[in-house]
Structure formats: C-alpha cells, structure tokens
Image: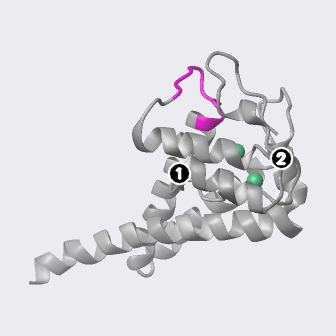
C-alpha cells in the first residue's frame, strides 16, 4: 500500500496540475490576456517578422512559477510534482501553440486529421478575428470542433477571415 501510494500521489498531482493548467491558461487567456493584460498579448495578434513577441513574457512568468515550485519542493515534496505538471503543460503549450500552429520551429507540418488538426484549426479560429474582442477558442490543449467555433463567431457577430483555415502552402499571416 505504502509503495502504491508513493507512486499514485505524485502521478495524480502531475496529471492534475496539467489539467488545472489548461483550465487556468484558458481562463487567463480569455479574462487577463484579452482584458487588462492585452498590452503584452496584443503583440501575438499582430503580424510581424520579429523572432520574439512581448507576449512571450507570459511564458516567462509561468516558467518562473515552475522554478519557484521546484525550489519550494525541496521543503515540501508535493510542490515538486505540481511544478513538474506546470513544466509538462509548458512543453505541450510550446509544441501545440508555438510549434504546430505558429510554426516557430524550423520546419512545417500541417496536421490533416485527428486531434492535432482539431487543435490547429481551433487556434487558427482564435486568430480569425482582428483585435481583442469577440474571439473564440482560448484553450491550447483542449479544442472544440471547428464548426462549433464558427457558430460561436456568428453569435459574436464577427466576420471571420476564411483564409485562416485553407492555407496549404503559404505561411499563415495571423492576426
Ligand atoms: Zn489571444
Ligand atoms: Zn496564437
């Protein structure tokens, strides 16, 4: 029992933290980054040729939180597992959002089916609206099907930029 628990508790804390982080990232993307935190996030919704965006500061803040959790974990072990969950989430965010959708890595891969396609399309729909108001799909790992997002945009009375979904060869210009 002792040994089962010694594995189970860390695993639950890690998985729980990853799930919590997706919820928290979705919430803060909607209410902070598209609210009073738009000053940093705006850079991510405008076309540019720079390697870095002011929006990357948010990733640094989350990385700082993970580091603090690891440090505090020396004093109370469960915080290490929570810190590991936050780090894994950061990795998923980087691969799915920065890599897959925004192609900030040196190769191009556009998913054609399944979960990856859904995540890819959902986040492109997030960028289908200009500015901070009336956007849809604020999550990064969980994504709704694209037809649901189109309906939400219609209720938000937003005209969408259709080109976000059908770029096959061009590097997308997102805003
Ligand atoms: Zn956004
Ligand atoms: Zn984005």
Where residue 161 appears, as percent x and y from the top left, is 79, 37
Of the two numbered discs 2 and 1 on the same chain, state the one appearing first in sequence: 1
As drawn, 104 above or below 80: above
| Residue 145 badge | 1
Q: How much space separates mark 2 and mark 1, taking CA atoms?
A: 18 Å
Task: Locate residue 139: give its quadrant.
Answer: bottom right
Q: Specify the quarter for ligand 2.
A: top right
User: Looking at this rendering, what residue extends furthest in the top direction?
Assistant: 169
Q: Image point 78% across, 35% down: which residue? A: 174
Dot 2 crowding, Cα within 10 Å, few <14, some 14–19, many 20+: few
Q: Is residue 124 above or below residue 148?
A: above
Question: What stretch of residues is rendered in magenta?
Answer: 101-110
Secondary structure beneath dot 2 equals loop
Badge 1 crowding class, 10 Å Cα cut-off, few under 14, some 14 to 19, many 20 or more, is: some
Residue 52 in the image: state x and y as whole percent. 78, 37
129 is within the stretch colored magenta? no
Q: Quadrant of the N terminus?
A: bottom left
- The quadrant where residue 135 appears: bottom right
Asked whether mark 1 lies closer than 8 Å to ligand 2, one says no
Residue 158 in the figure: left or right of residue 144: right
Q: Which mark is residue 2?
A: none
Question: Does the magenta-highlighted stretch encompass residue 105?
Answer: yes
The image quadrant of residue 169 is top right
Residue that carries the numbered disc 2 in the rendered image: 159
Picture coordinates of residue 163, whole percent (x, y): 74, 30
What residue appears at the point 65 percent right and 27 percent down from the top-left corner? Answer: 166
Does the closest atom of ligand 1 sit within 8 Å of the Cβ of label 2? no
Task: Name the main secondary structure of what is drawn in magenta.
Answer: loop
Q: In the displayed structure, would residue 105 be above or below residue 143?
A: above
Q: Residue furthest left?
A: 1
């Amino acid at each position: 029992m002792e040994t089962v628990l010694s594995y189970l508790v860390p695993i639950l804390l890690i998985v729980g933290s990853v799930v919590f982080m997706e919820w928290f990232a979705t919430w803060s993307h909607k209410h902070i980054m598209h609210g009073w935190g738009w000053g940093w996030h705006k850079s991510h919704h405008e076309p540019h040729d720079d390697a870095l965006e002011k929006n990357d500061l948010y990733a640094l803040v989350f990385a700082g939180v993970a580091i603090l959790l690891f440090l505090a974990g020396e004093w109370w072990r469960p915080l290490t597992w929570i810190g590991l969950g936050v780090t894994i989430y950061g990795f998923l965010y980087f691969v799915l959002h920065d890599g897959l959708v925004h192609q900030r890595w040196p190769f191009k891969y556009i998913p054609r089916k399944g979960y990856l396609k859904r995540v890819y399309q959902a986040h492109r729909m997030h960028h289908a609206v200009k500015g901070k108001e009336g956007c849809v799909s604020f999550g990064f790992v969980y994504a709704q099907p694209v037809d649901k997002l189109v309906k939400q945009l219609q209720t938000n009375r937003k005209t969408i930029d259709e080109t976000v979904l059908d770029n096959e060869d061009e590097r997308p210009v997102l805003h």
